[in-house]
Image (cartoon, rainbow, N blue to C red):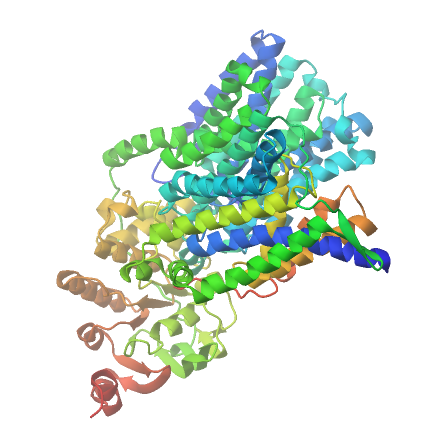
Amino acid sequence: MDLFLQLLFTGIGIGAVYALVALGFVLIFRATNVVNFAQGEFSMVAAYLMVVFSVDLGWPYWLSFLIALAGMAVLGIIFNLGVYYPLRHRTFLPVIIATIGASILLANSVLAIYGPQPQVLQGWFETPGIQLGPVYLDSQYLLIIAVTVALVIFNYWFFEHTLLGKKLQATSQDKEMASLLGISVSSMIMITFIYSAMLGGLAGILVAPVLFVSIQMGSTIALKAFAATIIGGFGDVAGAIIGGLALGVIETFGAAYISVPYKDGFAFLVLIAFLIFRPQGIFGERVAEKA
Amino acid sequence: MSAPSEKMVAAPVLRSKPLLLRHLPYFAGAAVVVALAAGMQFDGYILNILMQATTFSIAVFGLSVVLGLCGQINLAQAAFFGFGAYAVGIGTADLHQSFWLCLLGGVLVAFVAGAFLGMSTLRLGGHYLAMVTISFQQIVTLVMINAIWLSHGPDGVSHIGRPELFQSSQAYLAFCVAMLAIVGYVVWHLPDTRLGRAMRAVRDNELAAGVNGIDVFRTKVYAFAICAALGGLAGGLFAGGFAYVSPDQFSFAESIVFLTMSLLGGVASPVGSVIGTGLLILIPEWLRFLKSVPGLYLAIYGLFVILIVRFMPDGIWGFVAAAFERWRAQTRAPPAVKALQLKPATVGGDTVLEVTGLSKYFGGLKAVDGVDIAVKRGGVHALIGPNGSGKTTTLNVLSGLYKATAGRIVLDGTDITNMPPHQRTAAGLGRTFQNIRLFRSMTALENVEIGAERPGNTMIGKGIGGDAALTERAMEALTFVGLGSRANELISSFSYGHQRLIEIARALASNPTLLLLDEPAAGLNSTEKLELHELLKRIAAQGLTILIIDHDMTLVSEAAQHITVLNFGRRIADGESMAVLRHPDVVSAYLGSE
């Protein structure tokens, strides 16, 4: 039972990271109808930015954090202008391929600059964690969970109760109508890319102390976050979060009770099972193309 | 599973010389290249590069089928390549089986895995497929590294055998080149076969492909399985060539390399595959210094992918071929054709279409609510009603794009209520769309051929020579609507009105029992409307039953003998045209009541 609770805690912590990245996926998908396959690289790049400023240059953690987030905003802008925007009138296939190209470019550029050696990033807190009864609560996991909860609340408030959020929603639902109402569609899409690059970056910075900072961390997290969005119901915000948490828990238990080397395989098996038996996910509803 | 292989040898369109003679130059050229590969003395380094280029090209052929022809993405080609390679590796080195048996086994494993993966996700389309293939790729890599008892883990499999006949590297290379030529031939001609046309139709417009009698899902699964099998074949040949395989040769990065090769050369043609593969194997060899910095080389690949997609969407060969095709289309003369014969089936009773109690609800909205329609054989029946009255929804339920909430649809004695669109088409339904849905990357003739190919079309021959009959039928239908002279032009060069006529020709070529026309007059100018009216008369004169939806009252009242009126999803009037149009409920529905 103690092990069970401990694993549950770890699983939720890791799942919260998937949920954050999944949220980034869903926001971009809703705004542009495109799945951004480089979403995971945003996390990876942000983690490396932290390593550069906080570890290599020895700057304060909070300052490095702000710089990394600002860097992600810039990356979001470049990504939109260089990858998505020129292809916005094409079908989804070229756009998908371009984002995959961008993902390969980002991951391997970092590899070329920084080399293959995984890096270590310290956590935010000095205290490693607290013992609560039988369960040891790692401080970084606690932080991850807290930030995720805060962001979900922020996200809800932002999209439902601010004018900008409503403009973003209008854009994602009907671009033509939104532009006729005087909303600048291209700047709404730009904001979406900036916001989800920062979300992805935040997830990367939060998870970096738990994992190693490596080139592969981006694609691993992205694949699981995508699996999470499908499990939750594609394009659904709540679904992405529930899916992410569920996946983190499944994976942690799978690694503990079944097999460690195949840990990364569980997410994909769950994904394929969902696609076969419940493709619309937990919350989603399939919408047919209109004739 | 036998359907595609039978059809692969069918002839392309509008040429008259026998198949073998026409393709003789290709085989002669291929024989020369094979002889060169066998005869010339290469040093080991060149030999390795050629071996790699040859086997990789076959794997990239697979992508040209699935991505180029069918428009579906596969990011796990390296995994399928790995299946073939490990089958030959483990089979010959550990189990001491014959090379041929292992190669066949590898192809089969890849084929089955591809079909399974396709069946589980192809219904869902692009994004899912991309992610699932990446996931699959990752699982396969994990297994290759961790299942040490089977794959020897990261150490890989060495001492892989070759067939007795091709023991020397030179002879083996010649064998691989011969395989490349054979597979290339099949892939090259695939677009002109029934399966190939179905794939292109699916790529261009899935919905229209479905209502024209193509089983969209099965077509995609075939494309995917063929792609995987070609990957397996290539991998098996690769393993024999290099005698050693290890997991890093079949990673996700390799799948990206395959994709880049395919995109660079041109995804639509095997020629493009060979160009792309050759360039991307040679360029890194010339720029070896790039490999000294880990990552740099793949980073450049990534950049390449973005730039190709942006600036050269059809690849190098696509660019060259498009220019050539434009030139050739102008010089090709259309042949003389006979008049189109419409012979609708006449087996059933007096009523061709019987709809009873048809309902379609979207959540709480009753778009169609308990509608009855009976369409008499040989007549023109119109379905009218104000905007939002449920006309198009009814048509979509009839053609199977929406599933009926309740009710029954009987077409010529067959209950089609629960059939998917392509089966309804096979049962004798033809339709056009309010917003035109043609296959935009095809010529007018090719579009109409897809229609003519309807399973159950008695107006085209079967078996050998079927393709010529198909082309003939399609030409007749195009000539019938007055566009025979422009058969070989791409859809994009036709005006809106003409595109509508091509859509009608596509439905006519299938020789339907019942033709559904969804607002055929929408967006036409007055001259075009007159032409359409004439066309409808000529169609009706041949005894084809038509169910037409339109707003144009002049067209409807003149063309139709029988009218059903819908309002708010319910039938408010039904009967002989003039009587219905004077019916007080109909007048008030259209003009508002006092």
Q: Image point 57% across, 19% down: which residue?
A: B291
| Image quadrant occupied by the N terminus of chain A | bottom right
Q: B356 or B380, which is in the foreground?
A: B356
| Rendering quarter of residue B578 | bottom left
Q: Is residue B149 left or right of residue B248?
A: right
Question: Quick check: B63 left or right of A289?
Answer: right
Quarter holding the C terminus of chain A is bottom left
B308 with respect to A269 (left or right): left
Along the viewing direction, whichever of B8 and A224 lies nearer the viewer: A224
Looking at the image, residue B532 lies above or below residue B89: below
* Residue B393 in picture, x, y percent from top left: 39, 72
Residue at left 72%, top 29%? Answer: B88
Where is residue B422 drawn, in percent x and y?
A: 47, 61
Is residue B448 at all visible to an observer of this figure?
A: no
Which of the pair A110/B257 is nearer the observer? A110
- The residue lying toward the viewer, choosing from B8 and B304, is B304
